[in-house]
Amino acid sequence: MYNEIDLDIIDINSEPPTEEPFRQYYFMAKCRKWVKDFEQKNERLPKACVVNMGCQMNARDSEKLAGILENIGYERTDCEEADFVIYNTCTVRENANNKVYGRLGYLHAYKKKHPQMKIALCGCMMQEAHVVERLKSSYRFVDLIFGTHNLFKFPELLASMLERSEMTIEIWQDTDKIVEELPIDRKYPFKSGVNIMFGCNNFCSYCIVPYVRGRERSRRPQEILREIERMADDGVVEVMLLGQNVNSYGKTFDEPFPFARLLQEIEQIDKIQRIRFMTSHPKDLSLDLIEVMAASNKICHHLHLPLQSGSTRILEQMNRRYTKEQYLALAGRLREAMPDLALTTDIIVGFPGETEADFADTLDVVRQVEYDSAFTFLYSKRTGTPAALMENQVPEDIVKRRFDQLLQEVQHIAAAKAERLTGQVRPILVEEVNAQDASLVTGRLENNSIVHIPGDASMIGTLVDVTLEECRGFYYYGRAIAAS
Ligand code: 5AD
Ligand code: SF4
């Protein structure tokens, strides 16, 4: 674990400190006492299951929750039949919400048979007032509910949950606080996400994120660099810088600190060999960034650049602040500076008012840019966003037809692009021994594609140059060049 706190030296009989993060360390020590009592009574440790339901930012938050639970003494499990289950929820699309209500039904059945079980919910969905109302009235068996802004208070909320039998609910509307130095349990020892900013100020008209994640806040560069240096000393060779809109990093400081400069500083950290970042907003992507990326041999030549729609008219309705032509020009500039760049994207189909001509523009951009892969989404109406009030919602059958057509196009192009890499020599970061065939190890290319090569566990966490011998759609078989 990273940032592990020595809880045994904390006096839990004194008053809790007011200063963060020391206040949370105090409550972690209190929970630790509870865990020890549980262990004595039951002759086993309590088991905790953290379920991540959202994006990479959520995944990073889940690592924080898991780190705290582990530091307290819980045993980690992936099975939801546990003593403590926490869902870190997402609300970007409506079906994410429906999934949570469905899964809670199953948990309730288990809890009826195991009444000492505790259930917690956190994350983006909890920032919606109507959700919390529904949970309060129809899901009384949930023990703890908190949101995105007070995640750092998890130990304090957990302590309160363990002490009481009523539902503990604490949701903040916003925050300007960034609390550093809480324990984190990384999923992989050799790669890690790093938050560089929180929140979003863009207010794309379909998107609920600015309402549930609050205003944009950047972490201080010194804090980010210190965290990455410590990770590097701890064996991390690849970092993924995370933010809703990394291109506007540092703009809110008194003395602005551009994202391109942050990348340059991270590159100086010797042991870090690969740097990734997401997500980029096309309107804020600077020429400096393109230059820094092109010149670097550590920054992956991979950019996730959400298009959302190829129609200038729809983009305007979406409040994206770029046109089809500007997007295409940017993609062209990027490809010119980095011919080996992998471009990936997000596209929404069926935004209110989308006509066949608008959809044709989206297909046109997809064909011109030739994305290496694309996440395609059916437009989902999110209560509270401006688009939810737009009258000309597109009928479901039309949206579905366009979606299928887009998906087919995207997959066709992606497969052709993947095939083109066959025969080339590219570096992969080896991540694990292949689960099906122990004579192989599996790694990832700069563009995140998977490659299987002959090898063994000693290669895990190292960068290896491989020849891509055979493309199987979206993954490859290859061979380390040194070994051939
Ligand atoms: N409906 C469908 N897709 C959405 N996204 C965000 N909001 C919505 C919505 N209301 C998609 C966008 C974004 C990705 C994370 O989720 O494409 O880039
Ligand atoms: Fe949502 Fe737009 Fe912010 Fe992305 S940039 S999180 S799509 S509001």
Image (cartoon, helix red, strand yellow):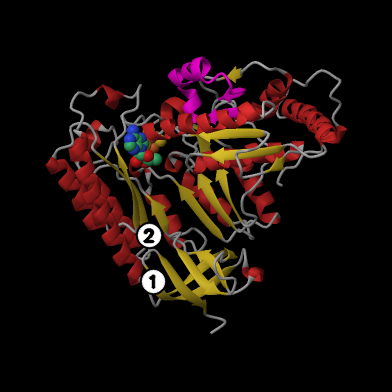
Which residue is denoted by mark 2 in the rendering? 342
Kindly identify the residue that appears in the image at 44 percent across and 62 percent down: 449
User: Which amino acid does the dot numbered 1 rest on?
Assistant: Cys
Furthest-bottom residue in view?
Answer: 484
Q: Quadrant of ligand 2?
A: top left
SS label for mark 1:
strand
Q: Is mark 2 within 8 Å of ligand 1?
A: no
Q: Is residue 2 magenta?
A: no
Any part of residue 247 in sight: yes
Front disc: 2 or 1: 1
Q: Where 182 sits versus 413, above or below?
A: above
Q: Indicate left or right for 450 with 115 as reference.
A: left
Q: Which residues are magenta?
A: 119-146
Q: Where 437 sits versus 43, above or below?
A: below
| Mark 1 surroundings within 10 Å by alpha-carbon count, few (fewer than 14), some (14 through 19), many (20 or more) | some
Between 71 and 3, the residue placed more toward the observer is 71
Between 316 and 132, the residue placed more toward the observer is 132
SS label for mark 2:
strand
Residue 359: name its quadrant: top left
Q: Indicate left or right for 144 with 105 as reference.
A: right
Q: Where 454 sits versus 158, above or below?
A: below
Between 355 and 321, the residue placed more toward the observer is 355
Question: Residue 471: which numbered mark, if any?
Answer: 1
